[in-house]
Image: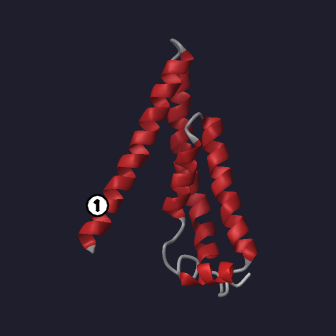
Amino acid sequence: MQLGQMAMSAAAVNDVVAWILLALAVALTNAGSSPLVAVWVLLSGVAFLLFMFLIVRPFTFALAHHEEPIPESVVAATLVIVLGAAFLTDLIGINVIFGAFICGLIIPKDGPFAGPSLSCSFSSS
């Protein structure tokens, strides 16, 4: 179990680094000769990561540990967070998938939000 968690963590870090490097390469290609665009993408990407992990993550922790059954408003708020993160990364110049991927990293994997109660709340509707 520990080996699997370590492998998945390493793969997640590898994906984050690859997306940032891809965004830098695309920014350099589209900017012509101006390296300021690449610096903007790099600094904005780091600021986005800090924002997501330091500000949004505690909010998602509160959402994920909501009472059971999980109300539809919690699911809708989670969707808004994912779409907002995708929109922000698109504004920065990084692919929208990066924002959704970071949301997948910051949403807690324990509690009623990640368990079978979520699927039960959808099937009972």
Q: Is residue 45 above or below residue 7?
A: above
Q: Quadrant of the N terminus?
A: bottom left
Q: Residue at 40% of width from left, 40% of height from top?
A: 18
- Side (left or right) of 2 relative to 62: left
Report the residue that reaches farthest toward the left: 3
Q: Is residue 35 above or below residue 6?
A: above
Q: Residue at 28% of width from left, 61% of height from top?
A: 7
Q: Is residue 75 above or below residue 47?
A: below
Indicate the secondary structure of the residue bearing disc 1: helix
* Residue 5 visible from this viewpoint: yes
Q: Disc 1 residue type?
A: Ala
Local crowd size for mark 1, using a 10 Å CA cut-off: few (<14), some (14–19), many (≥20)? few
* Residue 65 visible from this viewpoint: no
Instruction: Tell me residue 111's x, y (percent).
Output: 53, 81
Instruction: Tell me residue 121's x, y (percent).
Output: 67, 82
Out of 68 and 55, give the one closest to the viewer.
68
Report the residue that reaches farthest toward the top: 33
Q: Where on the picture, by quarter, is residue 55?
A: bottom right
According to the image, label 1 marks what residue? 7
Q: Quadrant of the C terminus?
A: bottom right
Q: Indicate the colouring scheme.
A: secondary structure
